[in-house]
Image (tube, rainbow, N blue to C red):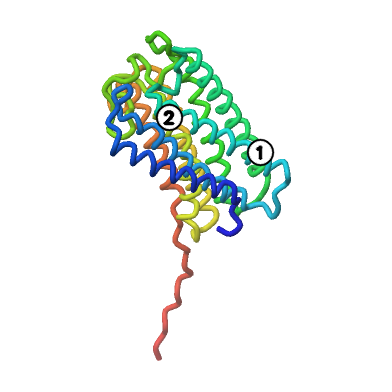
Amino acid sequence: MRTWYRPLVAFSGLMALTALASVIGLLVDDRELLGAPIWMKPLKFSLSFVAFGLSWAWLLSLPERRPRFLRGTALVVIAGSLVEMVIIIGQVVRGRRSHFNVGTPLDSMLFNIMGATVAVLFIGTLVLSVYIAARRLAPGPELLAIRFGMGIALVGMAVGILMTTASSGVDGVVGAHSVGVVDGGPGMPLTGWSTTGGDLRVAHFIGMHGLQLLPLLALAIRGRAERTSTRIIWTASLGYLAVVVLTTWQALRGQPLFAPDWITGTAVGVIAAGVALGLLSARDKAPTQAPTEERISA
């Protein structure tokens, strides 16, 4: 870890402290917003940024040297993330929602700033991803997992754009997490994902964390034959991407995650079967042994 990019490590540490502060907020502040504890949002964002920051701190340790533009891009990403967290926490203190809120001139200005920071985060992450993906900085299967992880994370980030186009059904609110129902209705524990309608946060969450899960999978299977590991990564990555696409499609059709219709259920079965077949075909084959000659006793 001594070679990890220190500004991102420091950023992750700061987000860990913010997560701790949010936990304290949950314990001492009983206010709710949209049916959920008001400090739950900064807690979830803080934990997500911890994972994001540590992942990129590691990824930027892979090149032998970091060009100035790469360091500058990383610093811009950190700055954008900090601005977003400051606004989220500030709105919590005010007792106001941060996302999609245009109810007052101040709320509208803050939401527009957040929109700009999201664009900065996406473009900065895209630049970092292209730079890392274009170089052979790891063994074949691990590099494949890194490339897929970065690409799928960008897809997950892009799902957030769909939230700004969803109909909220509420005056002073532009955009929504939920589809087919109003934000703030019945939701799953911890995540708050809607249990009565579609929720774009599902695909957003799954996609974003491909950046961590796929490289971790590659590390877990290190030691297998390269051909086998490569097939496993291809299978897992394509299956993971298919799940992100499926959960996005499911949400846009207004279906809760655990209440799919037969079409969604069939798609799940097809993805599961494809992944299973891919993993079976990737199994290590036992080496063939030459037949032993029978010993002829005198």
Q: Which residue is mark 1?
A: 73
- Is tag 2's residue or tag 1's residue first in the polypeptide sequence? 1
| 252 is higher (above) or lower (below) than 75 | above
Residue 216 falls left or right of residue 262: right
> Which is nearer the eye, 61 or 12?
12
Secondary structure at numbered mark 1? helix
Q: Residue type at mark 2?
A: Ala
- Whether residues under marks 2 and 1 lie with C-beta atoms below 8 angstroms apart, the answer is no
Which residue appears at 44% of the width and 39% of the height? 46
Q: In the image, which is nearer the foreground, mark 2 or mark 1?
A: 1
Q: Residue type at mark 1?
A: Thr
**Could you say which quadrant of the image residue 239 lies in?**
top left
Which residue appears at 31% of the width and 20% of the height? 184
Residue 145 in sight from this viewpoint: no
Q: x and y percent of residue 64 in the render?
A: 69, 55
Which residue appears at 55% of the width and 55% of the height? 226
Q: Which residue is mark 2?
A: 203
Picture quarter with the N terminus: bottom right
| 237 is higher (above) or lower (below) than 268 | below
Secondary structure at numbered mark 2? helix
Q: Residues within 10 Å of mark 1 (few under 14, many from 20)?
A: some
Q: Residues within 10 Å of mark 2 (few under 14, many from 20)?
A: many
| 254 is higher (above) or lower (below) than 279 | above
Q: x and y percent of residue 105 in the render?
A: 50, 13
Picture quarter with the C terminus: bottom left
